Image (tube, rainbow, N blue to C red):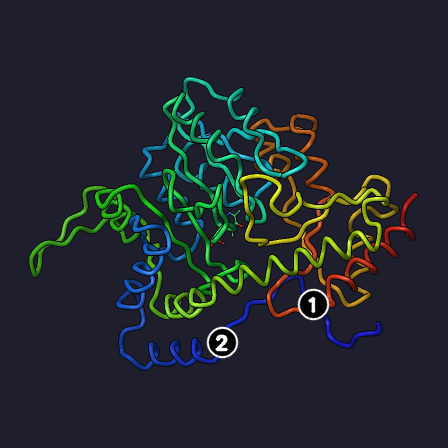
Amino acid sequence: MSDSTFLPFTRPDIDAQTIAEVGKVLASGWITSGPKVQAFEAQLSALFGGRPVRAFSNGTATMEVALRLAGVGPGDEVITTAITWVATANVIVAVGAKPVFVDVDPHTRNIDLAAVEAAITPRTRAIMPVYMAGLPVDMDLLYAIAKKHALRVIEDAAQAIDSRWNGQRIGSFGDLVSFSFQANKNITCAEGGCLVLNSLGEAEQAQRLRLQGVVRSGLDGMDVEAPGGKFNLTDINAAIGLGQLAHLPEVTRRRAQLAQDYFDAAAAAKLEALGIELPPPINSSGAMTNWHMFQVVLPADRLRGGRAAIMQALQDAGIGTGVHYPALHLFSYYRSLGWREGMLPHAERIGRSILTLPLFPSMRSSDPHRVCQALAQSCKRLLK
Ligand SMILES: *Cc1c(COP(=O)(O)O)cnc(C)c1O
């Protein structure tokens, strides 16, 4: 290893001022949901063009509440993608509904909207698209399909803060839009999430479902009309989020620059000639990603040892990688619901071949070159 420092696939950057703010919250005597959460929600609402926003303990809770708000429950079907973090499907199961997986577009790795339309049945209640690595789907087409079939849309925008569609920020339009602030996301609270809603009425409902369904009145009144969960964000986490949000524009700019560096480095290392597929190029359509991840699809079926051998070789070269994600219809639980190999061929190939390369704002501008060179070298050595 020529470099003594290990390059992880991602790393959060928390500045000193944010750390000091967290200390102030801890010393304040009010450490759970309070003024910091309200300030965080207000800043997020401003970011999303004034739409109501409520914060949650994590992005999974956010999506579960969104499904409940949309009235999704037993007997309903929700159409989603097989290439996502398993939370997307698990929350559909959690509310008693049935996840219906459709295949992905092999180029964008996002849900194939033509397949969505083909999967709609009389039981379909909602569509849950995921913006993989921050890349939105064709939002005009998504909402045209939803409107035509009177379906709710719960956008799993966990990875898509500051991504745009035709210049409009994801979250600033649409139906229910869920974000995550988990440690790996572009903006983090350590753990956290937020939901962008359509009305103050919906926001109030979300607020109840966030904390046991409790409705307070007067000084001592309390009632529960519908039981909720324990999904509130703490002021400790909100203080981290506030400190992060201040850096959002520069984070997005830096990530876009590093993505461009990757494309240049990939061309220099001739990755595509080795059968390695790159993400869609910058500004190739109305969809603008926030470069939450830079992911390649390996020629895994032609590699001795498959993807794991490449991961090991990069690890040995001091480079961390990640797998986001295996096709989730092939997990044991989802197989028990009847899903099988061969049902979603693009998702299955991508699920066993996709690899996340290091991308985070504080990495060095020379890192993409080093990563692409090491990737090309190991690929050449392992190709059958
Ligand atoms: C991170 C993530 C989630 C879940 O968010 P948590 O905050 O970890 O609960 C859901 N979907 C996708 C696509 C994610 O990347």
Picture coordinates of residue 344, whole percent (x, y):
65, 29
Q: Say which quadrant the N terminus sits in.
A: bottom right
The residue at the point 63 percent across, 33 percent down is: 105
Q: Is residue 53 above or below residue 30?
A: above
- Neighbour class for label 1 at 10 Å: few (<14), some, many (≥20)? some
**Residue type (three-letter) at the residue carrying disc 1:** Ser
- The total of numbered circles placed on residues is 2
Residue at 34% in and 80% down: 24
The amino acid pointed to by label 2 is Asp
Q: Is residue 147 left or right of residue 107?
A: left
User: Label 1 vs label 2: CA separation?
Assistant: 20 Å
Ligand 1 contact, mark 1 (Cβ < 8 Å): no
Q: Which residue is mark 2?
A: 15
Q: Secondary structure at mark 2?
A: loop
* Quadrant of the image occupied by residue 86: top right
Please state the horizontal and vertical placement of residue 237, each as a whole percent of the image. 40, 67
- Do labels 1 and 2 touch, CB within 8 Å? no
Counting residues from the N terminus, which is met first, the one under dot 1 or under dot 2?
Answer: 2
The residue mark sitting in front, 1 or 2, is 1
70 in relation to 38, above or below? above
| Residue, disc 1 | 365
Q: Quadrant of the C terminus?
A: top right
At horizontal 80% and vertical 43% (from top left) the residue drawn is 300
Q: Residue furthest top?
A: 122
Give the image location of residue 9, x and y in percent: 66, 61
